[in-house]
Amino acid sequence: MVDKVAIARRFIEAIPHAKALGLNLSTISEGEAEITMPYNPDLVGDPRTGVIHGGAVFAALDTCCGAAVMSHPSAPGATATIDLRIDYMRAATPGLNITTHAICYHITRNVAFVRATAMDDDRDRPVATAAGAFTVEGL
């Protein structure tokens, strides 16, 4: 039997941009993933405020969504982003890590659907939310 969770973990850990952003896959299970991005001054979008650039938040959400798809019991293998919509709710608090959480809630033969949230320490007020569609590719 294929251990999809282990495959997804190895895949995410091998992505060059994930390494550059310091992404840490903290939790992964069947169709669900959580990734933490540590605060890094090199990722600041506006030096006056110290707020992490939205592109880094986007990359963390995209990677987390892909991990959730890959670990889903109905997903046969790899995945790629088809469409990902991000709603930025507020600036992340400077100095705090950002944690992304994604759930793959539906899979068809060709497409997986995912929802995700990016948060800092204030779990009641998300930094951003995401909704996306990802390919479902065979092993």
Image (cartoon, rainbow, N blue to C red):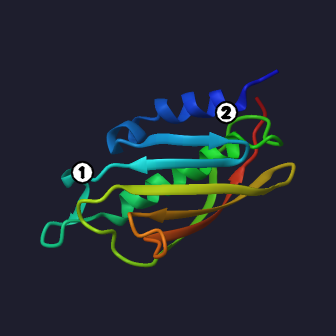
Decide if residue 14 is on the left or right side of residue 138.
Answer: left
In the figure, 23 relative to 89: above or below? above
Decide if residue 50 is on the left or right side of residue 125.
Answer: left
Decide if residue 79 is on the left or right side of residue 94.
Answer: right
| Residue pictured at 64% horizontal, 27% vertical | 6
The quadrant the N terminus occupies is top right
Q: Which mark is residue 5?
A: 2
Q: Considering the numbered disc 1 on the image, is that residue within a helix, a strand or a loop?
A: loop
Give the total of numbered labels: 2
Q: Position of residue 77 (x, y in %)?
A: 73, 34
Q: Position of residue 4 (x, y in %)?
A: 71, 31
Dividing the picture into quadrants, the one containing residue 138 is top right
Of labels 2 and 1, earlier in sequence is: 2
In the figure, 44 relative to 38: above or below? below
In the picture as drawn, the residue positioned furthest to the left comes out as: 48
Q: Nearer the viewer, residue 27 or 40?
A: 27
Q: Amino acid at mark 1?
A: Asn
Query: Which residue has dot 1 on it?
Result: 40
